[in-house]
Image (cartoon, rainbow, N blue to C red):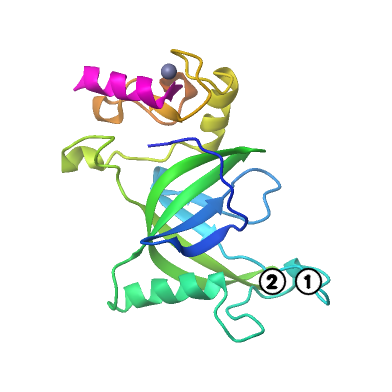
């Protein structure tokens, strides 16, 4: 489920940038600009909205409420995601599908899967209001397993585990040394009781070796 790819997206929140998907970039690294967090054992992402952009007259965006609207009156990215979440909660539309990429270190972005945007709210943070968005991981049916009971075991691999694996395997497929199209592979699959929480059970494989291994298991 975790394809490593470079991301050339310039901004963290991209509402329907690539329909029918929206895209967000997250990070839970120390010192990350926003406090994104993962809950419920890797199934839920709580994503923080974004600040007023730095521009003339804005001294410190971290002191200002996160904006719903641009000065021109149009919705900001916060506003667009917020409205989509509310439309879903009111029953007007299906949940917005959001692809999530995570920065695990400089220059390394990891694909965390497709999520559904199920809730949004405003929250008081120290001295201002910030947006919070709740996203639920959609199980990767193809990659994990064909039965619904087993889908319940789909989880994100925690960031620190991904980083540990990346360092240990030196950013290469453990089978052939390829540095492109890498996947975080469960050595023992979820469906066979393997864990996502320990680096011992995760390795880097290129797409070709990932596919080859899957065929062998099935
Ligand atoms: Zn390989």
Tell me where residue 215 sits by quadrant. top left
Q: Nearer the viewer, mark 2 or mark 1?
A: 1
Numbered circle sitting on residue 52 = 2
Horizontal side of residue 123 vs 197, given as left or right: right
The residue tagged with tag 2: helix, strand or loop?
Answer: loop
Which residue is at the front of the view, 157 or 4?
A: 4
- State yes or no: residue 172 in magenta: no
- Please say if the residues under marks 2 and 1 sit with CB atoms less than 8 Å apart: yes
Q: Quadrant of residue 50?
A: bottom right
209 is within the stretch colored magenta: yes
Q: Which residues are magenta?
A: 204-218
Q: Nearer the viewer, residue 205 or 179?
A: 179
Q: Provide residue 212's location: percent of width, then percent of height.
A: 29, 19
Which residue is the site of mark 1?
A: 55
Report whether 193 appears left or right of 99. Answer: left
Across and down, in percent, residue 170 comes to 59, 19
Residue toward you, 42 or 126: 42
Q: Is mark 1 within 8 Å of ligand 1?
A: no
Tell me what residue is drawn at x 67 percent, y 84 percent.
71
Q: Quadrant of the N terminus?
A: top left
Which residue is at 56% across, 82% downward? 74
x 55%, y 71%: residue? 78
Q: Main secondary structure of the magenta part?
A: helix
| Mark 2 within 8 Å of ligand 1, using the beta carbon | no
């Amino acid at each position: 489920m975790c394809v490593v790819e470079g991301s050339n997206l310039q901004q963290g929140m991209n509402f329907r940038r690539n329909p029918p998907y929206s895209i967000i970039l997250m990070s839970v690294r120390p010192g990350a600009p926003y406090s994104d967090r993962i809950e419920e054992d890797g199934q839920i992402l709580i994503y923080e909205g974004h600040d007023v952009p730095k521009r003339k007259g804005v001294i410190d965006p971290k002191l200002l409420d996160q904006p719903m609207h641009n000065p021109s009156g149009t919705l900001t990215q916060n506003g667009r995601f917020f409205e989509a979440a509310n439309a879903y909660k009111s029953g007007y539309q299906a949940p917005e599908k959001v692809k999530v990429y995570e920065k695990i270190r400089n220059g390394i972005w990891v694909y965390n899967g497709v999520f559904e945007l199920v809730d949004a709210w405003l929250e008081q943070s120290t001295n201002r209001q910030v947006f919070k968005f709740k996203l639920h991981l959609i199980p990767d049916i193809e990659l994990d397993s064909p039965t619904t009971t087993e889908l319940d075991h789909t989880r994100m691999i925690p960031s620190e585990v991904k980083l540990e694996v990346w360092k240990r395997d030196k950013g290469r497929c453990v089978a052939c040394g390829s540095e492109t199209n890498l996947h975080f592979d469960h050595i023992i699959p979820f469906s066979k009781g393997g864990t996502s929480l320990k680096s011992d059970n995760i390795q880097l494989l290129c797409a070709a070796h990932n596919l080859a291994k899957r065929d062998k298991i099935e």
